[in-house]
Image (spheres, rainbow, N blue to C red):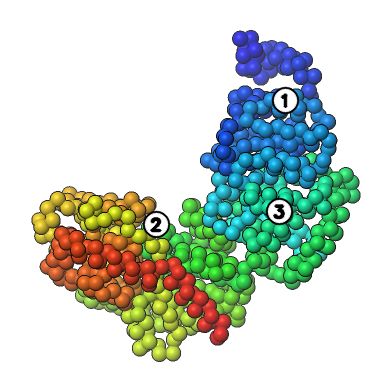
Amino acid sequence: MWRVRLWLAPRGSWREKVGRRIVNFFFKKTKDNQWISDLRVIGKLYKFPTNPNPLVSVVIPVYNHFEITLKCLKSLRQAKNNVSFEVILIDDCSEDKRFEKFLKKLNGINYIRNKENLGFLKSCNLGTKQARGNYILLLNNDTEVTDNWLDWLIETFNANPLAGAVGSKLVFPDGKLQEAGGIIWEDGSGWNYGRGESPDAPSYNFVREVDYCSGASLMIIRKLWENLGGFDETFSPAYYEDTDLCFRIREEGYKVMYQPFSKVIHYEGLTSGTDVNYGVKQFQKINCTKFVSKWKNVLYFHSNSNLLNDLQIKNRYKKGFVLFIDATTPTPDKDSGSIDSYNFMLILNNLGYAVTFIPQNLAFFDEYTINLQKMGIEVLYFPFIKSIESFLAEKGNLYDFVVLSRITVAREYIDIISSNLSKPRLIFNTVDLHYLRLQREALLRCDNILMEQSESTKKEELRVISLSDITILVSEKEKEIISELLPTAKTVVMPIPRVIPGRKNGYDSRRDILFLGGFQHLPNVDAVEYFLEQIWPLLSEELCDVKFLVAGSNMPGTFTGLGNSKNVELIGYVKNLDDIMHDIKITVAPIRYGAGVKGKIVTSLSYGVPCVATSIGIEGMGLEPEENILIGDSPLDFINCVSRVYYSRELWEKLSDNGLSFVKQKFSIEAATERWKEIIDCLKRG
């Protein structure tokens, strides 16, 4: 009991002083007892979890520097991670006896002490032989890890099937960036990319392929590590072994990736010093010569820093550069247009192009920005970029292609690009013909002011199309319209790209009717109001207990009272469509005006859910009424179509099968990828 009182004693009290004297007596009067506190945290208050089948084996080679090692272990134990891991500590015959006395007793740590000093490289090779995880994580003992650092590394492997190794972002204790992946030049010299800069800058915060990542925190597939035989002992005792490993990984057909969201603090130089003329550090020069001799044929293509710009330096493994500008950061869980922009950028990235995205509002948009960054898209935002105009003037000619998405964006920057930039080819992504949508709404509402807006927008869109190298349209109908208005314009119909989840449940296990759409898009608001006013009152009598569900983001306040209508349920935003689409029997798209291709229809058919729509809703999509869609342009026709498919298993299954087959062929990611290849080939040919 007295020991508890001493440990909990207030700082400066007599009990604390007595306790410290007792501790100093038993632990040889150490000058700084912080390590004792750390040891208690690691060894008693927190026990490393033991797992017979860990996903990751964290291998930490150590030689002396006891207190530093304790800090590393403490951070490793306290950092929040979902990934299961084991810790293998390789003591390279430390002279400090505290290692053997205390660390080998820590619960959950596999402590291995070398019989003789082998050096860093051989210690790593020896320690990894004890690994049980599917992945090996090499970690320096002069590091402190942060929350989710392991989770992010594993996610990188999951998202990149060809990834062989993934490294963390290394940060100095003062918060400055130490390394955002490594660069090797033709003479074998290396750069820690971003060293001394802000770790929050966009250039250092997207996943990308790199020459190498420091072995201070490097994860590799265990089977690949074993096939390669670990570190090449030619580079013993240390230096260039991690660089050589990364080059060998690439030689095997894998990629070395940098993961910025796996953050590790690295106390550089604490264990080996910084003087390249003394101690182990002198092998940095010696092993550089060995490395150049071994990899001279590869290094021939690595150029030097004077010949490359920053875009080329950080994207060595990309074949070209695309600048993509849209109104806002895509929110693909909320609206169809965002799904298109998001997938377009991923397609271009997968085709081997480095994609830089700028939202017109220059906003960092939390998880939506991060989602792009973790998929390998560089996102620029304030305060790291002050204006798009100045960025285009300064760096626009570094890009091969510029994509302007929507007329509201294109009209702002078309003149800067067409007049001042000589290199990039300009791609105008209409999303839909805005003027056509406004025109149809004006006719529906007999609104002269809206008609004037449509005419003004038409002039802007036609001007941008005429100045663009190629224009993306989303339907054959819109291509026909533009061909008549601007016969010389280069246009291409781009299928809206969708992941096709397929049908999970059959006819019998489904019920209810769904409208799905983002309600910042006014045609969707009109469609729901029209359906509830002119269709649902009669249809609900016929379908009895069937519910009409309304799902989508940004639901307007005018819908508030609709939830009181008979069998109407306002669901609102749905994060995962699987939660609803696998149980719905029919979707409806009672669109009365608009343009382009309706994402809600493609989404419905991609889940194998039959859809009843209007003629304007399916315009330009190539759908066949009674084969893969039902059409109802009047309230009574719409009611009849919904009733027919709802009560007929045969018709439901026919529409489901045919609709699913249709979108697989026309609106898959693969179909959109082929169209992007055609666009790029066309622009390269001039």
3 or 1: mark nearer the eye = 3
Q: Nearer the viewer, residue 104 or 441?
A: 104
Q: Position of residue 17 (x, y in %)?
A: 71, 15
Check disc 3 and report its element: helix, strand or loop.
helix
Check disc 2 and report its element: helix, strand or loop.
loop
Residue bearing mark 3:
228
Q: Is residue 608 above or below residue 146?
A: below
Label 3 – label 2 distance at C-alpha:
42 Å
Q: Is residue 42 above or below residue 332?
A: above
Dot 1: few (<14), some (14–19), or many (≥20) neighbours within 10 Å? Answer: few
Residue bearing mark 1:
102
The mark that comes first in sequence, 3 or 2, is: 3
* Residue appearing at x 67%, y 33% in the figure: 110
* Residue appearing at x 79%, y 19% in the figure: 29
Q: Position of residue 453 (x, y in %)?
A: 32, 76
In the image, taking residue 431 as reference, residue 167 lies left or right, namely right
Q: Residue furthest right?
A: 277
Q: Quadrant of the C terminus?
A: bottom right
- Specify the amino acid type for callout 2: Asp
Q: Residue 333 got which mark? A: 2
- Specify the amino acid type for callout 3: Leu
Do residues under tags 3 and 2 come within 8 Å of each other at their CB atoms? no
Label 1 – label 2 distance at C-alpha:
51 Å
Q: Residue furthest top?
A: 2
- Specify the amino acid type for callout 1: Phe
Q: Position of residue 663 (x, y in %)?
A: 35, 68
Check disc 1 and report its element: helix, strand or loop.
helix
3 or 2: mark nearer the eye = 3
Q: Position of residue 569 (x, y in %)?
A: 22, 51
Label 3 – label 1 distance at C-alpha:
34 Å
In the image, taking residue 354 as reference, residue 427 lies left or right, namely left
